[in-house]
């Protein structure tokens, strides 16, 4: 008896859409829609990276942008990243896993692999951004609390036409020496600029696990 032929996929798998769970998250999503440069600070689990990945995935899949680029500074807790084994891309890959998982959540594995193989989803160290320009792109800088003021300024000025810059971090969790983090400084300087949104998420926005909010409230007092 002939074996039945597996039914071929005739439609591209749909993507998941992101939805706000709190009022602050609604403001964050509104900021991304209405502005071209968006700063967001908040504790772990509050949705800053998750929401950024969700909106970027939707816009990529609908064709309103050409690519998504994810980057972060080469700073890791407790050690110099230069001491880690491998070439530059090998050093940075483990630290980009959270955002890869976020994109896969919204795009699905099939879409994610397609866009990644086409070069439309890119992961780059922040240090490799200098001198480049990105048009039709969602540019997402994660862990920005570990960026200096000059690094954030450099990243923002990579923005080309029909692009958005999303800069996320937790200003209370920097691994830089005290006073060197540029995220808070940029948020303070640019909050009244047209085309720029500054959003702050709190412990009350944490959706990952309720216990995280209770632990952070104690540890940060």
Image (tube, helix red, strand yellow):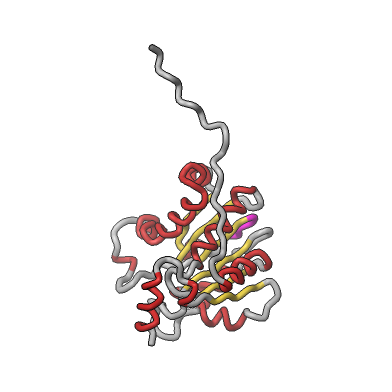
Q: Residue at x 51, y 68 (%)?
A: 48
* 76 over 58 or under it: above or below: below
Give x and y (percent) for residue 134. 60, 58
Give x and y (percent) for residue 112. 49, 47
Relative horizontal placement of residue 76, taking residue 72 as reference (left or right): left
Give x and y (percent) for residue 40. 54, 72
Furthest-bottom residue in view?
221
Q: Residue at x 38, y 78 (%)?
A: 214
* 200 over 161 or under it: above or below: below
Q: Is residue 119 magenta?
A: no
Chain part drawn in magenta: 132-136
166 or 102, which lies in front? 102
Q: Residue at x 59, y 70 (%)?
A: 28
Q: Is residue 135 magenta?
A: yes
Count of picture labels: 0
Q: Quadrant of the C terminus?
A: bottom left
Q: Quadrant of the N terminus?
A: top left
Specify whether residue 182 is in view: yes
Relative horizontal placement of residue 156, taking residue 109 as reference (left or right): right
210 or 91, which lies in front? 210
126 or 114, which lies in front? 114
Furthest-top residue in view?
1
Relative horizontal placement of residue 131, taking residue 73 as reference (left or right): right
Q: Residue at x 45, y 21 (%)?
A: 5
Snapshot quadrant of residue 79: bottom left
Specify whether residue 154 is in view: no
* 197 over 180 or under it: above or below: above
Give x and y (percent) for residue 97. 40, 57
Magenta segment main secondary structure: loop
């Amino acid at each position: 008896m002939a074996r039945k032929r597996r039914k071929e996929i005739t439609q591209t798998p749909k993507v998941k859409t992101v939805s706000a769970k709190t009022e602050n998250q609604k403001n964050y999503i509104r900021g991304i829609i209405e502005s071209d440069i968006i700063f967001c600070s908040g504790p772990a689990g509050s949705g800053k990276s998750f929401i950024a990945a969700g909106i970027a995935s939707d816009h990529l899949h609908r064709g309103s942008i050409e690519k998504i680029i994810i980057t972060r500074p080469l700073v890791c807790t407790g050690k110099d990243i230069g001491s880690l084994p491998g070439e530059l891309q090998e050093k940075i890959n483990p630290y980009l896993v959270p955002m890869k998982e976020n994109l896969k959540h919204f795009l699905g594995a099939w879409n994610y692999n397609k866009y990644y193989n086409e070069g439309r989803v890119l992961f780059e160290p922040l240090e490799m951004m200098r001198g480049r320009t990105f048009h039709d792109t969602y540019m997402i800088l994660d862990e920005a609390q570990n960026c200096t003021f000059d690094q954030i300024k450099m990243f923002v000025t990579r923005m080309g036409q029909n692009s958005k810059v999303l800069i996320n971090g937790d200003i209370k969790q920097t691994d830089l020496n005290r006073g060197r983090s540029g995220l808070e400084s940029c948020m303070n300087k640019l909050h009244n600029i047209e085309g720029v949104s500054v959003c702050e998420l709190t412990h009350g926005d944490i959706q990952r696990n309720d216990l995280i909010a209770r632990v952070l409230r104690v540890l940060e007092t």
